[in-house]
């Protein structure tokens, strides 16, 4: 996607700028990268990061100047997939994990990344910290977290590294708004004292010192020992202590202290000093508070921006400088602003007595803009897609005008909508008939009604073709996943206008909108009814007559009363075959075959209803079965 190129100066926030460029689709140019340094230009780890992002995207173009002081980055499509990368030893693997985690929900393929390098380093967020705190926040925004994991196969310390980390993330169709305003009380502290290629007695010295540092705060403290030998311990010796604290609301805080890398100048750090430092750092993080660890504020701010157009609330502790610049970058890339309120003003009276730490917290509120606008931004601003403003809701138009002031056009009327979709196949074929006073080269972006597929699926629109129509100048057909747009037509106006819709179709449309609203509510709460409906339908199919069809057994009790069926047969015999007689056994056999044929047709019709995600068998289901049966009689074969 092309658009206005954003320009930045300096090497700071390099990874966050590249990640936001991919998510927003905006090219960036970074200049003056260490221009006054003895070694000007980008470093090896930054070049490795660019290479990693090229592997998880398709169509990304990077231009680096000869001196390395200027980088031009044109993002492509996020693909994900399976990638192996050697991150080197200059930076911790968490430096590379941060943009991957931000991109992972929007990949085309499930992401499985194998990273080799340093897992724990002084002064940097470790892989253990990201696994403990970042994934907790990640889980709040997604519905499917089955394959979400960061696995440390080998632990690697500086200077030689040797660590191996595998990051896996599922495909997430959409994020959900989050409201995390409660902190809770710390209920347990857990930790891990890791030693690599050194004596394990150092681990127990760190544990004793950490427990003494936190003595009197909480009794539920358990710290395990992680001793690594051989390849699992990496290529360099070292030791460290990683601690986490979990609250009653599921909030996780983390802190870590590590020994000085081998070969660095200075005296070695004693295990007791590491234990005390880790314990005090954890207590400091608990005092700062918030509904998440301070290191995960970047993740929460990004996902709040990329959520559907709904309000998200998150209680932050004191904002580090990195989080402040993250909010500024989000405004530059996505044109979104956050509302920040002082915790003292929004704090409830009963929360003041809980003594949850510092009052220097901030309640962050944001309205997500969704990736739909990332996919359509440049097409809208270029004028290739126009939005009907004649019948739009004034509040919605005000929001859209704030985001995209160039998109308003009043040269065409509201289009008619023909929409057919199913539960299993969310790909939709939508036909839009519109009368334009200009040319047929413009694509029309209509008001899509709220449907189940439009809420769940995001994707790009492909133009299939343009055909002539008797009633309008042109008919533009799109094929692709349906889009849930915030500019949807109001329900009151949907049926007030005369689009040639019958009363029955209006009633069906109202029921569908009601069902879509209920499903969206269930989807946001994480409890869908699909499994319950499938179980109910399965139980219905396990009826007595259905089992007889499967096993071809004779019915012991007819569903239709035999006397009534015999009367029907007698009437048919009198009218059609007056010269013939029929025996009682033949009537019973005929009734058996008739009931089995009737049940088979009902089963096939129920499959059609299931495919269309409804429980009501309609006349068009039976008509379609009659069509198939007629074709089968003509010699054609259809598999159901």
Image (tube, helix red, strand yellow):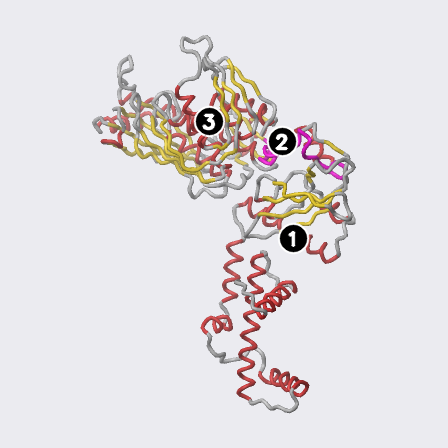
* Residue corresponding to mark 3: 294
Label 3 residue SS: helix
Question: Where's the N terminus, which quadrant?
Answer: top right
Dot 2 crowding, Cα within 10 Å, few <14, some 14–19, many 20+: many
Q: Position of residue 511 (x, y in %)?
A: 66, 54
Tell which circle, 3 or 1, labels the residue nearer the N-terminal end.
3
- In the rendered structure, the answer to whether residue 67 lies left or right of residue 5 reads left
Q: Is residue 598 above or below residue 364?
A: below
* Residue corresponding to mark 1: 512
Q: Position of residue 407 (x, y in %)?
A: 70, 31
Marks 1 and 2 sit apart, C-alpha to C-alpha, by 30 Å
Label 2 residue SS: helix
Please provide the residue range marked out in magenta.
366-392
Q: Position of residue 254 (x, y in %)?
A: 40, 29
Q: Is residue 91 magenta?
A: no
* Residue corresponding to mark 2: 377
- In the rendered structure, the answer to whether residue 539 lies left or right of residue 165 reads right
């Amino acid at each position: 996607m092309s658009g206005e190129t954003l320009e930045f100066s300096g090497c700071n926030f390099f990874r966050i700028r590249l990640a936001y460029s991919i998510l927003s689709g905006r090219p960036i140019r970074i200049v003056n990268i260490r221009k006054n340094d003895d070694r000007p230009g980008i470093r090896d780890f930054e070049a490795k990061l660019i290479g990693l992002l090229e592997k998880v995207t398709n169509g990304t173009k990077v231009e680096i100047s000869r001196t390395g002081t200027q980088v031009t980055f044109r993002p492509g499509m996020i693909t994900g997939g399976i990638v192996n990368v050697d991150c080197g030893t200059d930076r911790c693997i968490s430096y590379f994990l941060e943009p991957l985690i931000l991109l992972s929900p929007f990949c085309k393929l499930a992401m499985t990344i194998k990273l080799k390098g340093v897992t724990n380093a002084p002064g940097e967020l470790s892989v253990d910290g990201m696994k403990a705190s970042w994934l907790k926040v990640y889980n709040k925004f997604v519905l499917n977290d089955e394959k979400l994991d960061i696995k440390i196969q080998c632990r690697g310390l500086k200077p030689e590294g040797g660590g191996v980390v595998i990051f896996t993330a599922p495909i997430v169709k959409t994020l959900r708004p989050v409201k995390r305003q409660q902190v809770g009380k710390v209920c347990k502290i857990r930790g891990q004292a890791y030693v690599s290629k050194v004596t394990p007695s150092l681990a127990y010295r760190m544990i004793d010192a950490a427990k003494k540092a936190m003595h009197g705060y909480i009794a539920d403290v358990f710290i395990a020992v992680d001793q690594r030998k051989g390849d699992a311990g990496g290529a360099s010796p070292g030791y460290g202590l990683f601690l986490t604290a979990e609250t009653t609301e599921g909030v996780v805080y983390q802190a870590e202290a590590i020994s000085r890398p081998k070969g660095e100048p200075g005296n070695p750090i004693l295990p007791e000093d590491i234990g005390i430092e880790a314990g005090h750092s954890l207590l400091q993080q608990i005092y700062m508070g918030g509904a998440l660890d301070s290191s995960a504020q970047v993740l929460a701010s990004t996902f709040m921006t990329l959520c559907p157009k709904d309000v998200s609330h998150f209680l932050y502790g004191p904002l580090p400088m990195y989080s402040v610049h993250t909010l500024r970058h989000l405004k530059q890339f996505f044109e979104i602003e956050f509302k920040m309120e002082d915790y003292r003003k929004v704090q409830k009276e009963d929360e003041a007595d809980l003594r949850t730490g510092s009052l220097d917290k901030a309640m962050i509120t944001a309205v997500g803009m969704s990736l739909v606008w990332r996919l359509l931004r440049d097409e809208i601003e270029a004028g290739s897609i126009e939005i009907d403003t004649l019948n739009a809701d004034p509040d919605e138009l005000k929001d859209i005008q704030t985001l995209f002031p160039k998109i308003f056009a009043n040269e065409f009327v509201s289009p008619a909508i023909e929409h057919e979709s199913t539960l299993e196949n969310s790909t939709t074929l939508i036909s839009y008939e519109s009368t334009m006073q200009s040319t047929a080269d413009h694509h029309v972006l209509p008001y899509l009604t709220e449907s189940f597929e439009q809420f769940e699926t995001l994707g790009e629109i492909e133009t299939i073709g343009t055909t002539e129509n008797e009633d309008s100048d042109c008919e533009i057909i799109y094929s692709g996943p349906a889009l849930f747009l915030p500019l949807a037509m109001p329900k009151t106006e949907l049926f007030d206008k005369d689009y040639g819709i019958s009363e029955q179709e209006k009633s069906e449309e109202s029921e569908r909108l009601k069902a879509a609203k209920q499903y969206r509510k269930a989807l946001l709460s994480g409890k869908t009814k699909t499994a319950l409906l499938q179980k109910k339908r399965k139980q219905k199919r396990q009826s007595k007559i259905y089992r007889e069809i499967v096993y071809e057994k004779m019915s012991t009790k007819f569903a239709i009363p035999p006397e009534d069926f015999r009367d029907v047969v007698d009437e048919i015999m009198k009218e059609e075959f007056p010269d013939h007689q029929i025996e009682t056994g033949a009537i019973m056999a005929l009734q058996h075959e008739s009931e089995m044929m009737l049940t088979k047709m009902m089963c096939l019709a129920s499959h059609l209803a299931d495919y269309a995600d409804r429980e009501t068998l309609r006349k068009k289901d039976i008509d379609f079965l009659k069509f198939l049966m007629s074709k089968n009689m003509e010699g054609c074969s259809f598999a159901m």
